[in-house]
């Protein structure tokens, strides 16, 4: 049986994938028309360095106003090929680059090659009792604006622009050839969901291939069972990027009381528990996330070490809860702080650093003497050096000396393919209060 069923499309005359369980879902296919674009000198330089984005403001000439998802070929002053990418008339990132330097034919074989290359890079994970990982990390794997995660038998494609929709057929077919799993769920970021005229009737969380999914999916990360909710969960259902930092926490947790702030569904909490923590407190503002952390503990109760760890949980604002905890005499051997991105725009960077600094101060005040602070940031706009300096400056002015254990960055399935792709940074340090 072919993995994807090809049918005549009602939307355009091209081919479509028909969803096996839902006859109403159709994937349109690319129109075949191409746009020719010329760009200014600075964009030519950036594209030669294989930058994955071409901004609208860099375009000096365009052959015609194309449609969302059309392929755009970019030329330099001498009419020499620079790059080919996906045209996005609704975004300031007007073209997302698929290939640069050498001309490429963007066809099913091209998608198969790029997705299998990406998956090959992750192959070492498969021997670590891990079947939840990022298969394709957008720009960093050569597919700008497209993320693919795997949770056991479920694949989740998340698109950050409707311009990907005409290419989903080829992406899905290639993906299923590399990983012939049970189903593919399509997720869209909010901006994409809002552009209904460009979505060909597709909706966020549609299952575009395979069996219907009503519920959560259970997968393994380093042998620990977790649930992911590809339909309703944040991101694509789980924060896969913290796997290595969680493993670091497991190593330092023995006998400790651990406070996990911004816990989501308890990723760090489970590793701390398996590492032999005496207690773990998960804290998140989202009640469904906290409920998920409770279920994740229950999933792993056949592990005696995890079952013996006392799991406490609090659904509250972290800033407020930390201030409240500081007024009690409760202190922790490990405090983990992994907040959401505080700087989505350039003018939010200073405010983000102030908020991080506040969390560092509150976290240090909740540590036992010589306890370990684990402080992470996922804001790509906040540079690693500024982030780490902020932690040390905050500690100094609050009269703590920090002993750095480790700085960490990206896991193997979250490679850094361009400057903006470096977003995750995390410091492990023990703290001593100078009384
Ligand atoms: N550490 C998690 C990922 C954290 S993502 C993991 O390893 O999986 C950020 C989390 O912060 C989200 O779960 C979100 O619900 C939570 N959050 C956002 N604002 C918050 C606040 N003010 N107080 C507490 N939690 C908050």
Image: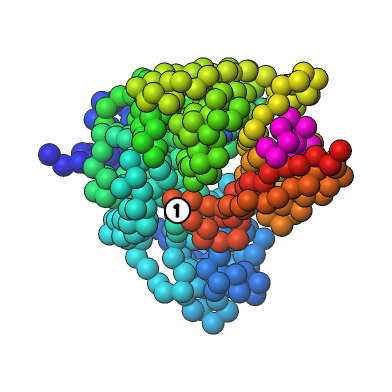
Count of number-bearing discs? 1
Q: Residue at x 49, y 79 (%)?
A: 80
Residue drawn where x is 32% and y is 53% of the image: 123
Residue sitting at 44 percent across and 57 percent down? 141
The residue at 55%/25% (across/down) is 278
Label 1 secondary element: loop
**Colouring chosen for the image of the structure:** rainbow
Where does residue 107 sit, x and y in percent of width and height? 31, 59
Task: Judge by depth and name the residue closer to the eye, 426 or 381.
Answer: 426
Q: Is residue 78 left or right of residue 404?
A: left
Q: Is residue 351 visible?
A: no
- Residue 277 is left or right of residue 180, and the answer is right
For disc 1, the neighbor class at 10 Å (few under 14, some 14 to 19, many from 20) is: some
* Magenta highlight range: 359-371
Query: Which of 142/374 is in front?
Result: 374
Quarter of the rendering occupied by the N terminus = top left
Q: Residue furthest left?
A: 1
Rendered position, 319 above or below 52: above
Report if residue 190 is visible in the image: yes
Residue 333 x %, y %: 64, 33
Q: In which quadrant of the rendered view does residue 324 lie?
A: top right
Q: Which residue is mark 1?
A: 412
């Amino acid at each position: 049986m072919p993995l994807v069923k090809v049918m005549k499309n009602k939307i355009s005359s091209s081919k479509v994938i028909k969803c096996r369980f839902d006859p109403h879902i159709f994937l349109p296919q690319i129109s075949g028309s191409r746009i020719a674009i010329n760009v200014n000198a600075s964009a030519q330089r950036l594209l030669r360095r294989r930058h994955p984005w071409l901004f609208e403001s860099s375009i000096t000439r365009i052959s015609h106003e194309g449609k969302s998802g059309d392929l755009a070929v970019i030329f330099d002053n001498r009419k020499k090929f620079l790059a080919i990418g996906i045209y996005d008339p609704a975004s300031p990132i007007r073209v997302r680059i698929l290939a640069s330097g050498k001309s490429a034919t963007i066809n099913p074989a091209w998608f198969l090659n790029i997705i299998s290359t990406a998956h090959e890079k992750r192959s070492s994970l498969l021997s670590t009792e891990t079947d939840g990982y990022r298969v394709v990390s957008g720009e960093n794997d050569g597919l700008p604006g497209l993320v693919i995660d795997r949770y056991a038998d479920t694949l989740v494609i998340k698109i950050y622009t409707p311009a990907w929709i005409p290419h989903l057929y080829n992406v899905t077919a290639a993906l299923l050839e590399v990983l012939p799993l049970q189903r593919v769920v399509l997720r869209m970021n909010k901006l994409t969901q809002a552009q209904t005229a460009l979505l060909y009737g597709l909706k966020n969380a549609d299952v575009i291939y395979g069996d219907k999914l009503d519920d959560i999916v259970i997968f393994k990360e380093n042998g620990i069972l977790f649930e992911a909710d590809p339909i309703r969960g944040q991101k694509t259902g789980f924060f896969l990027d913290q796997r290595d930092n969680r493993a670091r926490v497991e190593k330092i947790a023995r006998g400790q009381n651990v406070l996990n702030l911004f816990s989501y569904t308890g990723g760090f909490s489970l590793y701390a528990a398996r590492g032999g923590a005496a207690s773990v407190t998960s804290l998140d503002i989202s009640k469904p996330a906290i409920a998920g952390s409770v279920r994740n503990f229950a999933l792993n109760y056949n592990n005696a070490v995890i079952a013996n760890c006392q799991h406490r949980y609090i659904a509250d604002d972290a800033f407020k809860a930390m201030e409240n905890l500081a007024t009690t005499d409760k202190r922790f051997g490990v405090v983990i702080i992994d907040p959401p991105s505080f700087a989505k725009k350039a003018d939010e960077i200073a405010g983000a650093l102030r908020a991080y600094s506040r969390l560092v101060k509150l976290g240090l005040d909740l540590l036992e003497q010589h306890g370990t602070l684990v402080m992470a940031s996922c804001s790509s706009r906040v540079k690693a050096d500024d982030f780490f300096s902020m932690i040390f400056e905050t500690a100094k002015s609050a009269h703590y000396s920090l002993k750095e254990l480790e700085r960490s960055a990206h896991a193997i399935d979250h490679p850094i393919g361009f400057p903006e792709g470096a977003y995750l940074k995390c410091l492990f340090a023990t703290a001593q209060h100078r009384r």
